[in-house]
Image (spheres, helix red, strand yellow):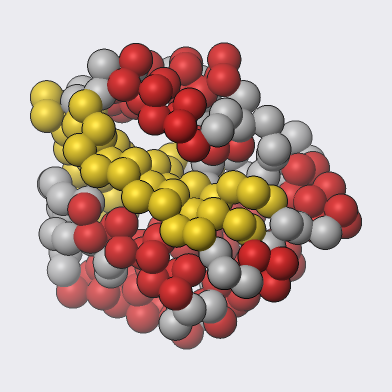
């Protein structure tokens, strides 16, 4: 995989911050309120991991982020961006232990089995083709403790320009191979989860926003 350069990661983070007050961002961040539990895992955590925790329904004792892109992890560790520093201070005040892992979420990790109360993925599950998604859902089920929750929030109906899409695809940041929204729900159920909440946001300005729909699935083991 071609690694996303640090400049791309930094731009992605600042662009995301600039959209914090939009209806689209408020919709997907609202799903993070469903995250509760002492130990939480973020799959494909990206550069927003520490910011995410500020929106959790209950602060965890430990947050683990795993990402294939080394520069996402480097950014979280080394960036001096003021908003990221505020998030780090928030974690410190709330005594949240953090762990960052460079790794492929599709490969099993023995140390994750039965460890987590909650697992979430933002903009990750929906880009995986069905065979890989089925395998990932099995891993997630095994990583969760009994009654643990899994949150999937994704974007679909891609409106990115050809150039931007090609760039993100090259970094494995996005792909159009993923199943439909309905099919993803079916696969989550087949993986022995019970879906307890589902919602879709139809983006009114999809050409400007670059996506047509945002959706969430909250499921329980």
User: Where does the image place residue 68, in percent across and percent down from the top left?
Assistant: 59, 39
User: Where does the image place residue 33, in percent across and percent down from the top left?
Assistant: 23, 60
Would you identify the image quadrant in which residue 121 lies?
A: top left
Residue in the image at 22% along x and 51% along y = 35
Report the side of 146 relative to 47 (left or right): left
Instruction: Identify whether 146 is placed above or below 53.
Output: above
In the image, 120 versus 156, the foreground residue is 156
Residue 93 visible in rendering = yes
Instruction: Identify whether 4 is placed above or below 147.
Output: below
User: Where does the image place residue 96, in percent across and percent down from the top left?
Assistant: 21, 59
Residue 104 visible in rendering = no
Would you identify the image quadrant in which residue 188 lies?
A: top left
In the image, 91 versus 118, the foreground residue is 118
Instruction: Identify whether 135 is placed above or below 215.
Output: above
Residue in the image at 48% along x and 68% along y = 24
Residue in the image at 49% along x and 54% along y = 214
For the N terminus, the quadrant is: top right
Q: Tally the numbered discs.
A: 0
């Amino acid at each position: 995989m071609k690694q996303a350069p640090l400049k791309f990661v930094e731009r992605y983070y600042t662009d995301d911050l600039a959209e914090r007050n939009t209806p689209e961002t408020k919709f997907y961040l609202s799903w993070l309120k469903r995250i509760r539990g002492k130990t939480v895992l973020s799959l494909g955590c990206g550069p927003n991991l520490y910011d995410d925790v500020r929106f959790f329904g209950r602060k965890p004792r430990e947050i683990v982020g795993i990402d294939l892109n080394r520069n996402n992890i480097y950014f979280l560790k080394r960036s001096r961006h003021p908003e990221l520093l505020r998030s780090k201070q928030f974690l410190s005040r709330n005594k949240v232990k953090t762990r960052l892992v460079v790794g492929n979420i599709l490969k099993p990790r023995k140390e994750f089995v039965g460890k987590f109360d909650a697992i979430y993925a933002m903009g990750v599950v929906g880009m995986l083709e069905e065979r890989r998604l089925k395998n990932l859902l099995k891993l997630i089920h095994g990583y969760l403790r009994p009654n643990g929750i899994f949150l999937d929030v994704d974007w679909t109906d891609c409106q990115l320009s050809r150039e931007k899409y090609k760039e993100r695809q090259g970094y494995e940041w996005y792909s159009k191979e993923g199943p439909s929204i309905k099919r993803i729900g079916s696969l989550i159920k087949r993986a022995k989860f019970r879906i307890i909440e589902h919602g879709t946001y139809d983006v009114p300005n999809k050409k400007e926003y670059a996506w047509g729909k945002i959706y969430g699935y909250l499921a329980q083991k």
